[in-house]
Structures are given as C-alpha cells and as structure tokens.
Amino acid sequence: MKVFVAAAVAAGLLSAAPAFASADLAKAKNCLACHAVDKKLVGPAYKEVAAKYAGQKDAAAMLATKVQKGGVGTWGQVPMPPNPQVNADEAKKLVDWILTQK
C-alpha cells in the first residue's frame, strides 16, 4: 500500500511539472508583467483567453504568433508588444499552458 501511495504522489508531481514549468516560463519571459491567470491586468487574464478560444482548433498557432509578433484590437486598444525574446517553441509551450487555464 505504501508503494502505491508513493507511486501515486510521484505521478501527481510529474504530471503537474509542465504546468509549473509553463508558469515559470511565463514569469521568465516577463508575460506576468501584463497578464495574470485569473484577473485582468494590462492584458486579459489567461482564463479569459482560454475561454475565448476554447474549441478553436487553430487558436494555439494563431496565439503563438501573437505572443511573438504582438497585436492589438482583440481585447481593446491597448497593444500587446512583440516579444522577440520568446522563440517559437517557447511561444507554443506558453500558449498550450494558457489554453488549459479554467
């Protein structure tokens, strides 16, 4: 029984690792200066973004491009600046994480 509990705890920690890694990546890339998971700051909350794009199969690719190149108009007139410090792989990881927020 102890082995089963230990294995379940280890599996839970491993499955949570990508979520923490993506939150850490968002912090490292300065995304959290303008965004939060659950409230609007300068830009929309990540939960709002996830809700808006839920079920749209092209959303991840479109949003990854926006992360890198910036944009304006979707959430109002405050522009999201380009983020040249975020490469394509990082943008995909960030967007995949954002789209899982509930």
Image (tube, helix red, strand yellow):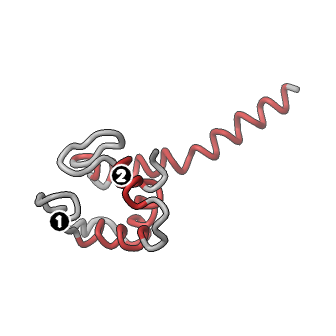
The residue at 22%/63% (across/down) is 74
Instruction: Please state the horizontal and vertical placement of residue 24, each as a whole percent of the image.
Output: 41, 47
Q: Which residue is mark 1?
A: 73
Q: Give left or right: position of 57 versus 7.
A: left
- Measure the alpha-carbon separation of dots 2 and 1: 22 Å
Residue at the spot 30% in from the left edge and 43% down from the top edge? 36
> Which residue is more in the foreground, 63 or 1?
63
Nearest to the observer: residue 89 or residue 62: 62
**Element class at badge 2:** helix
Crowding at mark 1 (Cα within 10 Å: few <14, some 14-19, many 20+): few
Q: Of helix, strand and loop, which one carries label 1?
A: loop
Residue 2 spot, x, y in % from top left: 84, 25
Q: Earlier in the sequence, mark 2 or mark 1?
A: 2
Q: Position of residue 94 (x, y in %)?
A: 41, 58
Where 24 sits versus 65, above or below?
above
Residue in the picture at 22% in, 46% down: 33
Q: Amino acid at mark 1?
A: Gly
Percent across and percent down for residue 3 are 85, 31
The image quadrant of residue 59 is bottom left
Closer to the camera in the image, 2 or 34: 34
Looking at the rendered image, the quarter that the N terminus falls into is top right
Query: Is the residue 13 above or below the residue 57 in the image?
Result: above
Dot 2 surroundings within 10 Å: few (below 14), some, or many (20 or more)? many
| Foreground pick, 101 / 74 | 74
Which residue: 56% across, 46% down?
A: 17
Q: In the shown orientation, is residue 23 left or right of residue 12?
A: left
Residue for badge 2: 26
Query: Label 2 amino acid?
Result: Ala
- For residue 55, the mark is none
Judged from this view, the residue extending furthest toward the top is 2
